[in-house]
Structure formats: structure tokens, C-alpha cells
Amino acid sequence: MPTSSPCILYIHGLNSSPASLKASLLSRAMARLGLAAQLRVPALHHHPRQAIAQLETLIAELGRPVLVGSSLGGYYATHLAERYALPALLINPAVRPHLRFDGYLGPQQNYYSDETWELTADHLAALAELDVPPPQDPARYQVWLQTADETLDYRDAQAYYRACALRIQAGGDHGFQGFAERLPMLFAFAGIPRHLWQDIDFSALN
């Protein structure tokens, strides 16, 4: 469904879902703007190869969406942004997660669907296949980090994306506090016309 209006593809993180707080806030905000049809928030398969296949199908459908990736979704978004030369906004993105999950192999449970699954060495191998060098065109990226992220060390992303537009906020957490208030920045990055969102108090969506 290629369109001349900006489309957004939101990519959630590990054991997350479209029901997560950020995904829900973005969905409600896009509906408020009358742009619900221009947002996709897929429920991703836990295996990276299947998740990437889902996302590639949606990219083909949407044409040239703006990618918004959180945590592991930020890692997926970076791979896809480099492959397809797409713009990407990353929120506390994971960097080289295949090097960090060794201690987490075994049973997993999705926080929202209660689905249980097994994190295996094949998952890590599939993640390693997606690793790319730091962005070749950093102007296509914006990276939001909060320093009190309890899951990922923000300094890893700060170093990896150092040539990109970094927005580093003291405090916060892995879920990214204050996301609703930052939606205007996301919409500006995505190229959504300012008159649609400039007078809306998105904090009311919390």
C-alpha cells in the first residue's frame, strides 16, 4: 500500500507486543490524528528470522515506512534501515544482542500474551546474522536513550550510534519514561505535517 503520506512501522522488543505502553500510546496518538491506517504495529514472532520476514512483508506493503524500534526492535530496525535505506527512530535500542543473551538461554514468557517459548542458540545465531556496522547514513537516524535504563547500558548505543542524532536524557528506564510527551518529536521526524499535531497535549494519552 505505497502512499505519499508518511507511514510508521513500530517494532517492539523481546517478549513485548502491540499491547505494550509505547505501542499503545503511539496507536492512540495516530488514531487521534486520523492516521491510524498509516501505522503498523505487528506482533512479532520470537525467532529473529521469522520476525524479520514479517517486517519485510510490511515494508513491501507500506513502501518506505519510517521505522520506530524499541530495545530489540531497535536492533531489527537498524538492520532493516541499512538494508532498505529507511529512516529509523530508535528507543533504548539493543546493540549486538547476540553477545548478551548467553545467560538467558532457556524458557521465556511474553510479558503480554503469556506465550512461552525457548530461547536457543539458533536464536542467537539468527541475531548475529542481522548485525551491521554503525549506520552508513547517520542522517536517517534519531536515537533516544535514557541513562537509567535497567536492561541495557545506554553507553553501548551512544558509542555505536555516535554519528547519529542522539537524544540522551538523564534518568528514565528501559521502557522510556515520558514517551507520550515526546510524540511530537517522533511525528516531526516521521514527516507528519505539523498542523496535525502541534496543538495536541499527548500527555493526556497516558
Image: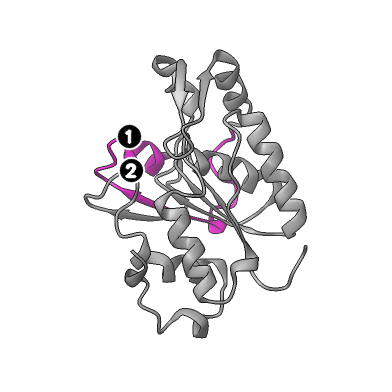
Q: Residue at x 61, y 34 (%)?
A: 45
Q: Residue at x 33, y 72 (%)?
A: 204
Is residue 203 depicted above or below 20 in this figure? below
Q: Position of residue 42 (x, y in %)?
A: 60, 48
**Residue that mark 1 sits on:** 151
Name the residue at 58% across, 31% down.
Answer: 131
Nearer-the-camera pick, 105 or 34: 34
Sequence-first tag of 2 and 1: 1
In the rendered image, residue 139 lying in the magenta stretch gets the answer yes
Q: Secondary structure at mark 2?
A: loop
Identify the amino acid type marked 2. Answer: His
Q: Position of residue 193 (x, y in %)?
A: 56, 80
- Amino acid type for the residue under numbered disc 1: Thr
Q: Quadrant of residue 51?
A: top right
Asked if the residue at tag 1 contacts the one at tag 2, i.e. Cβ–Cβ closer than 8 Å, the answer is: yes
Which numbered marker is on residue 174? 2
Give the total of numbered labels.
2
> For the magenta stretch, what is the residue range?
132-159
